[in-house]
Image (cartoon, helix red, strand yellow):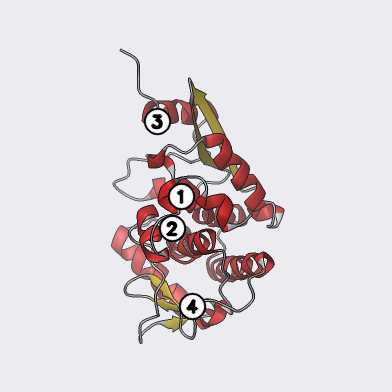
């Protein structure tokens, strides 16, 4: 798994600076120096009090019925803010970040940045996978320890965040079979508890194939007031047939 493999999926991934290519995938993703107010990631992911306050704030703001529901959704936000852009940076540049504990996280802007230098000196892919695994494990331990969120929920949240760069390719109509092969190869570097927390569905109609994730554990978002018990599109509480029908409706034009 390297940057050439990912960047070869579409010309838009090969043109321009790293920052501009990140923005093409997701305008919210960036790779920049951390702000002066940023907290070292290694410290943040050990801070039980900060995590408890974040969950309590979310619970009050969204009227979540339990702290566990709020914690699942805060964890989902955190891994998306931390891991999605980090994976995208590696896929677009081929460079790992080291050491991850010193990365700065701007809590107010929900942005990750580098504090000493943008990349580590070692370009070994193994260092990248160690980096991502370290952050994923630290997030898992923090929310498992403080809120007893199910491991399957935490790992599903994590896997979806890590797969986000490929999910962002849907508007470019990249072949879903190729995306599926890259995702399988990518997740083969991680423990089964993480790698097997999401199933990849490939659906073909005519000459078009899409690849979409199916979580193997619900994030509990449906439990928030005002959601009407509505399920996310990737939720395993839906039957696989229902999910495939939703994918067909969203990505394949109906013939007149």
Q: CA distance from mark 2 to mark 4?
A: 29 Å
Residue 171: image x %, image y %?
Answer: 38, 41
For marks 2 and 1, the one nearer the N-term is 2
Q: Which element type, helix, strand or loop, lies under badge 2? A: helix
User: What residue is at 48 percent from the left and 78 percent from the top?
Assistant: 118
Q: Which residue is mark 4?
A: 118
Q: Does the CB distance between marks 3 and 2 fall below 8 Å?
A: no
- On screen, residue 16 versus residue 195, left or right, reads left
Q: Nearer the viewer, mark 2 or mark 4?
A: 4
Q: CA distance from mark 4 to mark 3?
A: 37 Å
Closer to the camera, 196 or 33? Answer: 33
Q: Nearer the viewer, mark 3 or mark 2?
A: 3
Q: Nearer the viewer, mark 1 or mark 3?
A: 3
For marks 4 and 1, the one nearer the N-term is 4
Q: Which element type, helix, strand or loop, lies under badge 1? A: loop
Above/below status of 244 relative to 230:
above
Residue 126: image x %, image y %?
Answer: 69, 66
Q: Which residue is mark 3?
A: 251
Q: Kindly identify which numbered label has been placed on residue 220.
A: 1
User: What residue is at 34 percent from the left and 69 percent from the top?
Assistant: 57
Q: Does the CB distance between marks 4 and 1 fall below 8 Å?
A: no
For marks 3 and 2, the one nearer the N-term is 2
Query: Label 4: how many residues lie within 10 Å, few (<14), some (14-19) or many (20+)?
Result: some
Q: Which residue is mark 2?
A: 73
For marks 1 and 3, the one nearer the N-term is 1
């Amino acid at each position: 798994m390297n940057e050439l493999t990912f960047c070869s999926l579409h010309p838009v991934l090969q043109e321009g600076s790293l920052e501009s290519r990140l923005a093409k995938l997701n305008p919210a993703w960036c790779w920049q120096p951390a702000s002066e107010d940023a907290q070292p990631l290694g410290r943040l992911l050990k801070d039980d009090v900060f995590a408890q306050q974040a969950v309590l704030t979310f619970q009050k703001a969204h009227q979540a019925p339990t702290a566990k529901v709020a914690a699942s959704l805060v964890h989902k936000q955190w891994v998306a803010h931390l891991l999605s852009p980090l994976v995208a940076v590696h896929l677009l540049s081929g460079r790992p970040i080291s050491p991850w504990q010193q990365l700065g996280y701007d809590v107010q802007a929900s942005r990750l940045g580098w504090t000493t230098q943008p990349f580590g000196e070692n370009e070994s892919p193994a260092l990248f996978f160690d980096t991502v695994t370290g952050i994923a494990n630290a997030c898992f331990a923090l929310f498992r320890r403080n809120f007893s969120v199910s491991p399957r929920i935490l790992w599903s949240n994590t896997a979806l965040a890590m797969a986000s760069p490929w999910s962002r390719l849907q508007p470019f109509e990249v072949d879903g079979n190729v995306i599926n092969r890259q995702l399988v190869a990518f997740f083969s570097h991680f423990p089964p508890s993480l790698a097997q927390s999401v199933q990849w569905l490939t659906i073909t109609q005519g000459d078009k194939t899409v690849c979409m994730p199916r979580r193997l554990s619900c994030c509990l978002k449906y439990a928030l007031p005002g959601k009407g018990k509505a399920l996310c599109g990737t939720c395993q509480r839906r039957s696989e047939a229902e999910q495939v029908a939703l994918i067909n409706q969203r990505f394949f034009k109906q013939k007149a």
